[in-house]
Image: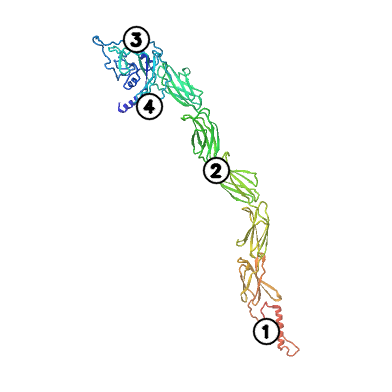
Amino acid sequence: MDNKHQLLFAALVLFCEAERQYFFYSNVSTWDQARLHCQICYKDMVSLTSDNIQLLVNNLSHDYWIGLRKSLDNNSLQWSSWSNGDPVIFQNWYPGRPILSPPKDPVINNYNTYILPTPTPTPTPSACGCCCDTPSSPTTFYNDNYTDYPNATVNVNLLSTTSATTRSTEVTTSNPTMGTTLFTGVTAPSNESNHTVTDGYIADPCIAMLSCGLWYERVCTMLLPYICYEDRFYGNANISGVTLHNASLSWASGPADINDYRVEVKAKYYSRNVTHSSLNYTNLTYQLSNLTAGTLYSIQVFPIKCERDLNPENVSFYTKPDIINNLKITDISLNSISLSWLPPNGNCDFYSVQVTGGPDETIQVNNSYVVVANLTSGGLYRFDVNAEVKDQSIKGAPQNISKYTKPGIVQNLTVHSHTNDTVWIEWKPPVGNTSGYRIEYFVDSNIRTHSTTKTTNFLVNGLPQGTMIHFTVFSLVADLSVDGDPQELTGLTNPGSVTDLQLEPQNTTITVTWKAPTGKYSNFTVQVNLTDTGEQEFLGNTNNLSSIVSNLKPGVQYTVSVITLNGDLLSEPRKQTVYTYPTSPESLQIVSFNQSQVSIKWKPPSASGNVPLTYSVTASSYFINCTKTELYPYQTKNTNHTFAGLTTGTKYEFNVSVQAGSLASLPITISQTTAPEIKVLIMTLECASNISLHCEDDTVKKSVKEQLSQYLHGSLQDFKIWNVILIPS
């Protein structure tokens, strides 16, 4: 065997070394009677080693039989083995003992002779082996080098022993410092055992251990107390099928020659002993019933041998806790849910709360309530609550409840847009989760209208114009069990537009009148803008249904808008355009002229400022019989104009006026004659007179010229350049 296997074997031997218990019997018996009793009720008589002898000697008050005899049978080597078959590897003889051979010659000595007492009759063996006298409580011993057994003597509790004989007294022993468990109750005979020392040879001696621990051979029929031993019994009890009030107990069978079993069941405020009449000896089982839920039970199964409890088989277990009662939600907030419940029937040590809904967690509490925090607002959570026992070996059936946390408040609730009969609101989702929204709104009363939506906007139409509408928006969860805090907003529909807008212009004013709209309004805004440029000329508010806009520019087109106000809301504007009455331009003058062209220029009306104006420019001339010929009607935005294609030597009248739509200002006028082209018209006049030389008279000539000039002026006037020259013939 190699070293590895040798070490393994040594370890196995060490692990399997039994813990021995020693029992000091005070009822005196012969060696054979003692051995028989020890073999029936224990394992055998004690065998001594260097390890256990010191422990045993500490508890000796008399001489005791031990399991050593010169010859156990005819086949064994003398002094070679103990009564249990263990080899004798340790000896502790009284000096000079044993005497191995008889004296060769008889010797008469003068020493005192110790006379052995007459043996008492051997008691008749009983059912337990010999005499059924009370053994002492066992002394438990194990080799403290065997560190594999740290708990070898834990929870040792012998609950009963047989009654002592009337000749015995109880002696209590103390525990040794080596940690070995000792049992009290060592008894000894009331009369001293015979300590007569036999110095002579005994053919087949049995060995007694003196109270000092030395070995001495005795006659085997001598009556002495004795020491039995047995290996401590370590059984294994098991519990299965645990329910609220029941469990199945099973256990391993005890060592040989077990007479009976006793089951002891203990719990707080509960104790029960079950006798053999109730136990199943075939299957070594027992059905526990009528137990209390959630309770710790300690069970010991005692094998009974010779009316003595052996080391018990121990097991402890909790019954299943009952289900909790009346689980309910007591409070809900954005990030927490509070639960409460009633304790279960029976007992429990604490509660576990399994939270499912992300992130999952398990909370343990000692009270019948809990506040689960750090949750997400608007989230759905399931809570499973179990009653638990201290070692968490078994838990009660769960009681569960599901609930949403309170959703958050909507963010940034605003009016997106509105008209005279609609209001459109919008918002942003709350922090956390939500499944939708509920909108409550009412118009000028407490009659509320409810609506739900999954979007973050809402349109209300069909509203009266100029009306205030009150909105309240709640975030929702899917089962509508809890709402978020309300977010409120007030909106207004736009007021209606004015009707029958009328404009009455003057040179620098416009009188504006209108009729009020239906619905609510607060006042009106009148706005006047230059139509061409959009430049604002006037803006004012009024509570009246008319307004006079002054300080305007004459001859200019204006756009007049009237807007109804309702608080900050505006109606659609009602608009019209109109021209102010124009005024005449100024400073008309001739710039240049020739035979066919005349250039003129002028200035705008000073009241019109720099506003662009439209001018109407015409030229006219008169001819024979004052017939007026109007030439070149023309419109321009310039302040100058050149007339071309005119007739030479003709007088023209030039008119310039400001044109404002269908309105025109009074014109300003200037005349100019084009440069003449000289032409001679020769007329022959015949002068006849009955007065001699009358026609030669200068006075006559002058008169004729004047008359001719008057005639031509009557036709041409100054529209043409002409002159009369008389040329004598």
Q: Nearer the viewer, residue 448 or 349?
A: 349
Residue that carries the numbered disc 2 in the rendered image: 408
Q: Nearer the viewer, mark 2 or mark 3?
A: 3
| Mark 1 or mark 2, earlier in chain | 2
Callout 4: SS: loop
N-terminal of the pair, mark 2 or mark 3, is 3
Helix, strand or loop for disc 3: loop
> Is there CB contact under 8 Å for labels 1 and 2?
no
Spatial separation of the CA atoms under disc 2 and disc 3: 102 Å
Image coords of residue 121 (percent x, y): 36, 9
The disc placed on residue 725 is 1
Q: Closer to the N terminus: mark 4 or mark 2?
A: 4
Disc 3 residue crowd, few under 14, some 14–19, many 20+, Cα 10 Å = few
**Residue 701's image quarter?**
bottom right
Side of 67 relative to 562 (left or right): left
Residue tagged by mark 4? 150
* Label 1 crowd bin: few (<14), some (14–19), many (20+), radius 10 Å: few
